[in-house]
Amino acid sequence: MTASGQAYNNPTTVSGITVVAVTSDTFVKLRDGNASGPVVWEGEADNATSSLTKSFNPPLRFYHKLYVEFVSSGANSAVSLEVIQPHEPTA
């Protein structure tokens, strides 16, 4: 299963992520902007350990939009993001 798209359509900050891999390894990339934007964070939930939970301190900033890429060879995986606040772009 491959899914990608805008998770948040404005500038924002992310303080945590949980990736659950039920039947196969699951890979996630968080990008600033769109599919060709810079990768701000990437991680893998290994099927053997079942999940990956990560807190970000300081939080990750996405200056344009929050774009998520999600890849798993199985159908039973999930991603959960903790968006703590939208923020206004700085001049």
Image: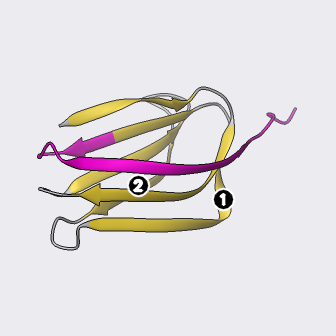
Residue 62 visible at all: no
> Magenta residues, as a range?
70-91
The residue positioned 17% from the left and 65% from the top of the image is 47
Residue 45 coordinates in the image, percent (x, y): 28, 62
Residue 86 coordinates in the image, percent (x, y): 73, 39
Left or right of residue 41: residue 48: left
The residue positioned 66% from the left and 28% from the top of the image is 10
Magenta highlight on residue 35: no
Crowd band around label 1 with a 10 angstrom C-alpha radius: few (<14), some (14–19), many (20+): some
Residue 8, by quadrant, is top right
Magenta highlight on residue 80: yes
The tag on residue 59 is 1
Give the mark nearer the N terminus: 1 vs 2.
2
Residue 39 coordinates in the image, percent (x, y): 47, 45
- The residue at which mark 2 appears reads as 42
The residue positioned 12% from the left and 46% from the top of the image is 74
Quick one: SS at disc 2?
Answer: strand
Disc 1 marks a residue whose amino acid type is: Pro
Disc 2 marks a residue whose amino acid type is: Glu
